[in-house]
Amino acid sequence: MSLNQTEQRLSAQFAFLNEADRLKSVLRATTLVDGSRRENSGEHSWHLALYAMVLAEQAAPDVRIDRVIRMLLLHDLVEIDVGDVPIHSAHGQAHGSDATQQAEAQAASRIFGLLPADLGAEYRSLWQEFEAAQTPDAVFAKALDRVQPVMANLMSGGGTWVEYSVTSDQLDARVGTKIARGAPRLWDWVRAKTRAYFDARGTPDQS
């Protein structure tokens, strides 16, 4: 690689890294576990990477945790352009809409397009794999992405569940199914805690 090629490659890499810094300014609906403030999407991505390391034993045998961590570090970069879409909000319930998917795809093209072509293609492919949630790695990554806000809400006294008047059944449908698909033992453990929370609030599940 020539000196000029090295210069161009480093310039592209740092353009991407500098752009990724903007994720730290994207506020999410979920608060920190102490409820003191809302977390930002950069913090969320870091925490999920740590979740993958610590909870790796909950993954299926064919899951590659190194790939899961890479997906989780990349998965929310599109929020730089699109913003956070709280899963329990009305907007979140329409998250699979064509308009939202198109906006996120455009954001992925722009952001990953800042990188050298080889890295841009590799990282966008990981992002697409996470979004599709069909491979074992992506299914486990998606489960962790769903369980982290659940734990934050439990620790903070309800968090977005209170804000969006979430019921136990809604939590199961919107979040529990994805956690159970990728980490069934983890969901069994978490579900016992969410049931205790909703029972204490007088909103038991309907099952």
Image (tube, rainbow, N blue to C red):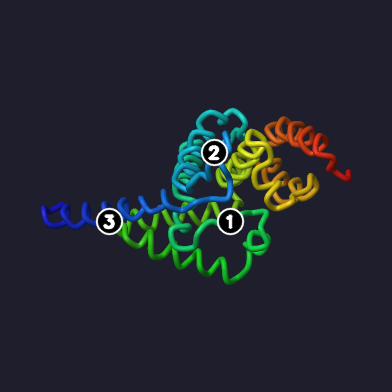
Residue in the foreground of this view, choosing between 194 and 130: 194
Decide: is 174 above or below 179.
Answer: below
Residue type at mark 3 is Ala
Q: Which residue is mark 3?
A: 15
Position of 26 with respect to 180 (left or right) is: left
Position of 191 with respect to 139 (left or right) is: right
Q: Position of residue 94 (x, y in %)?
A: 66, 64
Task: Of the two numbered discs 3 and 1 on the same chain, state the one appearing first in sequence.
Answer: 3
Residue in the foreground of this view, choosing between 206 and 98: 206
In the image, which is nearer the foreground, mark 1 or mark 2? Answer: 2
Task: Of the two numbered discs 2 and 3 on the same chain, state the one appearing first in sequence.
Answer: 3
Q: Position of residue 171 (x, y in %)?
A: 74, 47
CA gap between label 2 and label 3 equals: 33 Å
Question: Dot 1: what SS?
Answer: helix
Residue type at mark 2 is Ser
Q: Residue at x 53, y 53 (%)?
A: 129
Q: Position of residue 13 (x, y in %)?
A: 27, 52
* CB within 8 Å, label 2 to label 3: no
Q: Which mark is residue 36?
A: 2
